[in-house]
Image: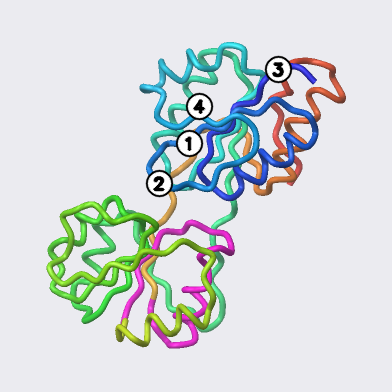
Amino acid sequence: MTGRVLVLGGTAEARRLAERLVAEGVDVLSSLAGRVADPVLPPGEVRVGGFGGTAGLAAALDGVAALVDATHPFAATMTAHAATAAAATGTPLLRLQRPGWTEQAGDDWRWVDSLEQAATVVAGARSVLVTTGRQGLAAFAGLTAHCVVRSVDPPEPPLPARTTVVLARGPFRVEDERALMTAHRVDVVVTKDSGGPMTAAKLTAARDLGVPVVLVRRPPLPEGVPVAATVEEAAVWVLRGWRERGTTRPPATRCPR
């Protein structure tokens, strides 16, 4: 196989895709933003750090056969840059994004469009579990409630006046999530609709305890970019270009769903 595949990563799906492609003999370069101090590295070559905007990413696509944007569902800026750079250079682009969570019987979910809206919704709570990541917590800085903030790395200030920081990396177990909420008498959970099983246990625990959950909706995806919901769909999209058409650039077609 010829041509390099650039995977914009930082997610479990990006790591699994790199594993799958490297096992098939594909030359994979994974790019990590560098926002996590001790990331779990995928196989193949890895670069860490930004590209310097759309122009920098476009320059980095020289010699790249295909670009897979497998960043976090809320990495809207990077996703927009990927769409613009791919269009400018004619590089086939695929967005690999796991499906969002689905509400189940017994859930008490309240949907909002931003962290600021989430902070407004929980303003009257006594104890809030915030699992929206370490960035953007300034939206909650004015809360008077006790805020339990969980993130992989120490969160960035400003933080609420009454904050307990819990440093942890998923996957999480339902029993541990129930214990955390019970110990801190959490009466509302705030999270983003990240999707996937690694952090879904808090939703089950909240359902079991009758605790409402405020979910931030995902940002919209750029128009016209094909989307894969699974690692296998993304791998098929990449490999099909080499195996069926014998080109160095996989076809920019929508994945089978």
Q: Which residue in the structure is indicated by mark 1?
A: 32
Percent coordinates x, y for residue 223 in the rendering? 52, 33
Q: Quadrant of residue 255?
A: top right
Q: What's the amino acid at mark 3?
A: Gly
Answer left or right for 41 relative to 188: right
Q: Position of residue 11 (x, y in %)?
A: 54, 47
Residue marked by disc 4: 83
Query: Pointer 3 and pointer 2: residues touching (CB < 8 Å)?
Result: no
Question: Mark 3 highlights which residue?
Answer: 3
Q: Amino acid at mark 2?
A: Val
Look at the numbered discs 4 and 3 and tell me whether their residues touch, using CB distance below 8 Å.
no
Q: Quadrant of the N terminus?
A: top right
Identify the residue at horizontal 12%, vertical 68% (top origin): 161
**Nearer to us: label 2 or label 4:** 2
Q: Amino acid at mark 1?
A: Leu
- Residue at 50% x, 43% y is 10
Residue sitting at the far front: 38
Residue depicted at x 70% and y 41%: 19
| Left or right of residue 5, residue 189 in this image | left
- Which disc number belongs to residue 36? 2
Name the residue at 53% across, 18% down: 87
Q: Earlier in the sequence, mark 4 or mark 3?
A: 3
Location of residue 20 with respect to 117 vertically, above or below: above
The numbered mark at residue 173 is none
Q: CA distance from mark 1 to mark 4?
A: 17 Å
Dot 2 surroundings within 10 Å: few (below 14), some, or many (20 or more)? few
Q: Quadrant of residue 246?
A: top right
Residue 249 versus residue 26 in the image, above or below: above
